[in-house]
Image (tube, grey):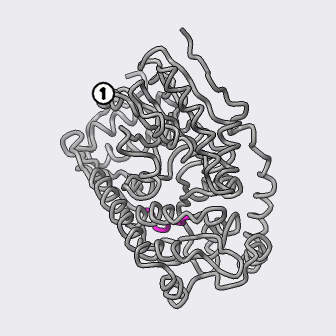
Amino acid sequence: MAREYLKKATLTARSDASNVTATVQEILDDIEAGGDAKALEYAAKFDNYDGSVILSQADIDAAIAKVPEKLKADIQFAHDNVKRFAQTQKSTMTDVELEIVPGLVAGQKVIPVDGAGCYIPGGRYSHIASAIMTVTTAKVAGCNHITACSPPRPGEGVHPAIVYAAHICGADKILAMGGVQGVAAMTFGLFDLPKANILVGPGNQFVAEAKRILFGRVGIDMIAGPTDSLILADKDADAEIVAVDLVSQAEHGYNSPVWLVTDDRALAEKVMARVPELIADLPDTNRENATAAWRDYAEVILCDDREMMAATSDEYAPEHLTVQAGDLDWWLARLTCYGSLFLGEETTVSYGDKASGTNHVLPTSRAASYTGGLSVHKFMKIVTWQRATREGSRPVAEATARISRLEGMEGHARAADVRLAKYFPGVNFDLTADG
C-alpha cells in the first residue's frame, strides 16, 4: 500500500517564509557604508544594549565568575567531546602528492581559512552548546582568528555561560552584538576585528538571510531553515521515549517540524495520544512552541515495512534522524540522507545537540540530501599544486596544445607551444587539433 498519513502537516517551513530580504539588504548596506557607528545604531535599536561591544578580558573574567562550577564542568565535558571528535575528523584530511606521469608531480594541501565568525544565538534560548560546536571546531581546524558573536540582553550583556564557553573553546574576540548587525560586523571587519572568511552558526531568519546574501563575499556553513527531526520506530520501540523525543525537538520553535515514521499502527496511536500530554507539561514558552510545531508541522506516517520507512526518511532528508528499531546495522547501511544519525534509544538528538561530540549545526529543509553539517572540513580549503621536470611536461604540453586548439582557445595552446619550443628545440611536434 502507499504511505498512510495518520497525521498530516498543514504547514511547511516554506509556508512561513517571510520576505525579509529587503530589510536585511538595507541593514547590510547601511552598516557597510556607515561602519562602526551605524552598527552601533542598529545594536541600540534591536539589541537595546549600550555596553561593551568587544568584551575585554575584565569583562570576560566578570562573566566567568557568574558561572556555577558545576555548569563549567559540564561545558568543559562537552567541549572535550566535541574537540576530540573534530580532531579525529581533521586527521582524515591530509596533504598528498602523486607522480601523475614520470616527471610530473601533483599534490593536495589542506589549509585552514584565516578568520572565522561564529554566531551564537542568545535570544529566546541561550545556545551555550552552539558556542562549543562552532568555536571548538574552528579552533581545531586551525583558524588564525575566531570571533564569537552573540546578542546581548538589555542591561546584562552576553549570557555568562556563553562567554565562558566561547572563551575556553578558543575565541580570540567576543562580540556582544546580535542579528544582522553582528553578522555584518564580522564580515566587514568592524570594531578592529579581522574580516571573517567564513560565517557559521545557527540564527533566526534575519541572520540566515544575512548569511545567504553575503555568501560569495564570505563562505558560510549552510543556508539554514527551522530545525527538523524524524524518528524511525518499529513495533518494539518504547512509545514513551519516542513521544518524549519528538516533544524535545518540537520545543525548538513554533515552525520546527517533527516526523514519526513507523510500520506499527498501535505504536503510532500511542505516541499521538501521549505527545499532547507531554507538551502540556512543558514550561510556558516551550509549551507554546511545541504546541504550534506539533499542531501545524508534525506528521505521523505509517509504512508497510522497513524498506518503505527508509525510503520515506531519505525523501524527507531530515536534519536529525533517530532509529528506534531492530537491526541497527541494517539501518546504518541503508539510510543515506540525514544531517546526523542517532541509532537506538540509548542515544538521542538532545545528546548531539549538547554534549556527545558530533556537531549540532546541521542541514535543514531537506538540504541533507546534498550536504552534511558543520565540521572541521568547512573551515579547511583543499587546494592543489603541481611541479614538473622538462621531460615530465612534454606529454602534458602536447595534449594541452591539441585539446586547446580543438576548443578554439589558441592562447592556451601557445602557452604549451612555447615550452615545447624552449625545452625541445629542433623537435617537430604535431600540435594541430585534427592530428
Vertical order, 429 against 43 (above or below): above
Residue 124 position within the rendered picture, expressed as x and y whole percent measured from the top left: 66, 62
Mark 1, residues whose alpha carbon is within 10 Å: few (<14), some, or many (≥20)?
Answer: few
| Residue type (three-letter) at the residue carrying disc 1 | Asp
Residue 315, position as x, y percentages in the image:
53, 26
**Rendered location of residue 67, percent (x, y):** 48, 79
Query: What kind of element bears circle 1?
Result: loop
Which residue appears at 58% of the width and 56% of the height?
A: 202
Out of 403 and 281, give the one closest to the viewer. Answer: 281
User: Mainly helix, strand or loop, the magenta region?
Assistant: strand
Most extreme residue toward the left, as rendered?
102
Whether residue 350 sits left or right of residue 288 in the image: it is left
Q: Say whether residue 184 is left or right of residue 62.
A: right
Q: Mark 1 highlights which residue?
A: 327
Residue occupying the point 45% across, 65% down: 132
In the rendered view, does 39 fall on the left or right side of 379? Answer: right
Nearest the viewer among 33 and 297 is 297
Q: Residue at x 42, y 52 (%)?
A: 351
Q: Residue furthest top?
A: 1
Query: In this picture, which residue range is highlighted in magenta?
Result: 113-119
Magenta stretch encompasses residue 356: no
Name above or below for residue 59 compared with residue 342: below
Q: Residue at x 50, y 48 (%)?
A: 362
Residue 118 painted magenta: yes
- Which image quarter holds the C terminus? top left
Q: Position of residue 295 (x, y in %)?
A: 69, 37
